[in-house]
Amino acid sequence: MPASNSHYRLSDLAERFDLELRGDGDQTIDRVGTLNSAGPTAITFLANRAYRKELPATYAGAVILKEEDAESCPTNCLVTADPYLAYARVATLFDTRPAAKPGVHPSAVISETARLGKNVSIGANAVIGDDCEIGDGCTIGPGTVLEAQCRLDEGCRLFANVSLGHGAILGKRVMIHPGAVIGADGFGIAFATDHWEKVPQLGSVVIGDDCEIGANSCVDRGAVENTVLEEDVRIDNLCQIGHNVRVGAHTAIAGRGGAAGTATIGKYCLLAGGAAVAGHTEIADRTTLAADSIAFREIKEPGTTWSAQLPARPIREWQRNLSRLRKLDELARKVQMLEKQLGKLTEDE
């Protein structure tokens, strides 16, 4: 990462973020980096023990780490119980991306009935529909489209080419990344003997304060009532949230994850990459689904971890296992038959 225009002494960072400083407090930091690439004016972190082997050889100006790793650190360090969280807070000081400037690009199309708050930024070729309300300090990126009657509370940021369907409602400080679609029709179809007929999707989408939705993710509008994301929900790229889903506050869903229609996900849940919740299924608060796992039935006990994944194996080993798996039913029947025969022999004795 190139140097930023910001320079901080380690002692100032330690005081600002309540970290324990060990080393030279006058060391100047002007960027962030990784353990194996950071230079003497960069700060990095160690949170995953898999990278501990890189710590002794780092050239970083400082490392954010746990107490147990401090003795192995060859440079200045900032000690904390949660290095990743501390790094996230420190790294915000070195974000060089420019803030959007208030104003409306000449190519933007804004309805006469739309209402814009103070210090709003509207990018090139954006479209703001009838009766939309844009709160103070919102940023609408280039090519973004808001259909009629959308409402954005203060401080929202929609990046390029985001689409908001009719009547979508966003709370404060919602961030939506490029290509995301909020409020498209849910997958509602009814089979009429020899063809499909569309079920009208008459609800909308309501997103709480401080939510973030990743690039090219979709949150469908409700069929009858609204699809709801409570506050501080974090959704990664390429995720799918079906119609009438409710996602509890502070839940995070990693890439390719999602939920089918009318699923309910509790608060503080974690869905790893590719994990999903089947339709009409409810999972309890603080549930964790491991990567590529699918919850097909209700999870009632809070705080549990579930997994249904099959880790990759060498191809020859997997082929042998698959061959045996195909014969599993036959094998089970043979075992049952042998058990009956053994039981009969035991009785005869």
Image (spheres, helix red, strand yellow):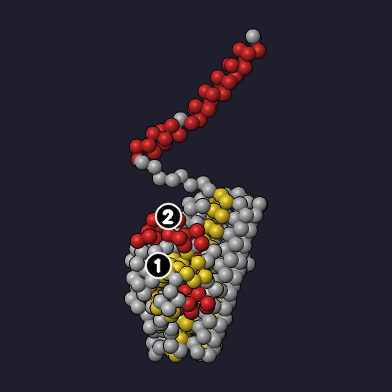
Q: Residues within 10 Å of mark 2 (few under 14, many from 20)?
A: few
Report the quarter where the C terminus lies.
top right
Decide if residue 341 is on the left or right side of residue 54. right
Task: Residue at 39% x, 90% y: name it.
Answer: 106
Among numbered discs 1 and 2, the one appearing first in the sequence: 2
Label 1 environment density (alpha carbons within 10 Å; few <14, some 14–19, many ≥20): many
Q: Estimate the spatial distance between the alpha carbons at disc 1 and disc 2, rounded to whole Å.
A: 19 Å
Q: Are marks 1 and 2 in contact (CB under 8 Å)?
A: no
Residue 187 at x, y = what percent?
52, 61
Give the amino acid at mark 2.
Ala
Residue 303 falls in image quadrant: bottom right
Q: Element type at marker 1? A: loop
Give the percent coordinates (x, y) of residue 91: 45, 73
Q: Is residue 124 above or below residue 75?
A: below
**Point 50% across, 30% down: residue:** 329
- Please tell me which residue lies in front, 341 or 3: 3
Q: Which residue is mark 1?
A: 75
Q: What amino acid type is highlighted by mark number 1?
A: Thr
Q: Is residue 332 left or right of residue 106?
A: right
Tag of residue 50 = 2
Question: Height in image: 238 above or below 310?
Answer: below
Q: Residue at x 37, y 80 (%)?
A: 4
Residue in front for this viewpoint, 87 or 221 = 87
Closest to the observer: 68 or 29? 68
x%, y% of residue 50?
42, 55
Q: Which mark is residue 118?
A: none
39, 99: nearer the viewer: 39
Q: Is residue 14 visible?
A: yes
Quadrant of the rendering where the N terminus is positioned: bottom left
Quarter residue 281 falls in:
bottom right
Q: For marks 1 and 2, give the one nearer the viewer.
A: 1
Q: Residue at x 57, y 24 (%)?
A: 336
